[in-house]
Amino acid sequence: MTTSEKESHPRIKSYILRQGRATVGQQNAIDNVWDDYCLDPSKIYDYAQIFGRDAPLIMEIGFGNGSSLAEMARNNPDLNYLGIEVHRPGVARLLMLLEEQGIKNVRIYHHDAIQILETKILDHFLAGVHLFFPDPWQKRRHHKRRIVRPSFVQILNKKLKKGGYFHAATDWEHYAKDMVSTLSSPNSNNGLVNTSVDGVYCPRPEYRPLTKFENRGLRLGHGVWDLIFKKI
Ligand SMILES: C[S@@+](CC[C@H](N)C(=O)[O-])C[C@H]1O[C@@H](n2cnc3c(N)ncnc32)[C@H](O)[C@@H]1O
C-alpha cells in the first residue's frame, strides 16, 4: 500500500475493543477512584492545574495493564504522566496500582489516543510520547491499522515541544522498520530526528521498564526494537 492510500484512511481505528470483565478489585477502583485520576475527554484542561504543578508532561499511548506506566511514574516523581488506553479493564488495573502505591503524577484518558492528541493537547506542549508494543497488525492487509502512519507523525510533530521525544518499542521487526521509515519520511515528518547513534535503533533506556506484552514476546523468543526520535 502506498503512503497516499494509507492516508485515505486516517480514521481507521488502531485497536479492536477487547472484551474483558473487571475483577472485584478493578470494579472497586472504578467505583471509588475513577474521578481522582480519569479526565473527561469532552473537556479541555489546563494540565498544570490538574496536576497542581507545572512539570514536563509525558504521554503514554496504549498503556495496557498500566504496570510499566505506574513504575515509570513512581521512579520519576518530577514528571507528569498522561496515560491513554481504550481497554477499560486496563484502565481499572492502573487505577488500582495508582491508588495502592499512592502515585500522584498520573492522569488517565479512557479514550482513543489520536483524538486526545489532536483535540486536547496544545501545540508544542508535550515533553515526550511513549508508545510501547503497539498492536502490530501483522497481516499485510491490516498494516493500514497501525497507529504509526504519516498522519500520526504529523500530529506528533505538532504536539511535541522542541527537544521533546517520541519513544516507541515493538517486538515485531516489520513494524519497527515501518515506523523508522514513516518517522524518517519527509512526507510526514519535518521536525523529528532519530537519536540512535548507529542511525536506526536504540538500546532500551533505563527509564523504560519491561512491559506485559514485551515479557510475553520475550517468552516466545521475540526480539525487541526501541526507537527514539527527538523534535528539533
Ligand atoms: C499490544 S497492547 C500493549 C500494551 C502495553 N503497552 C504493553 O506493552 O504491555 C496495545 C494496547 O494499545 C491500546 N491501543 C491501541 N490503539 C489505541 C488508541 N488509538 N488509543 C488508546 N489505546 C490504544 C490497546 O487497547 C492495547 O491495550
Image (cartoon, rainbow, N blue to C red):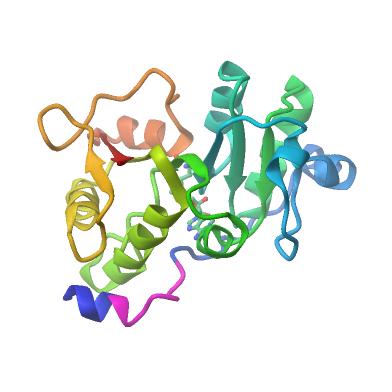
Quadrant placement of the C terminus: top left
| Image spot of residue 32 (x, y percent) | 89, 41
Magenta-drawn stretch contains 10 = yes
* Whether residue 14 is situated above or below residue 48 in the rendered picture: below
Give the residue drawn at x 27%, y 47%. 192
Residue 124, horizontal then vertical, whole percent: 48, 49
Q: Residue visible at 85% across and 40% down? A: 33
In the image, which residues are magenta?
A: 7-13
Residue 99, horizontal then vertical, whole percent: 78, 29
Which residue is the extreme one toward the right? 32
Q: As displayed, is residue 136 above or below residue 142?
A: above
Q: Residue at x 84, y 46 (%)?
A: 35
Q: Quadrant of residue 76?
A: top right
Q: Please, is residue 117 above or below residue 34 in the view?
A: below
| Left or right of residue 20: residue 199 | left
Which of 162/137 is in front?
162
User: Residue lying farthest left?
Assistant: 198
Task: Name the residue rendered at 74%, 51% in the picture.
Answer: 39
Task: Residue 14: name its quadrant.
Answer: bottom left
Magenta residues: mostly which secondary structure? loop
- The quadrant of the picture occupied by the N terminus is bottom left
The x, y position of residue 45, in whole percent, is 73, 52
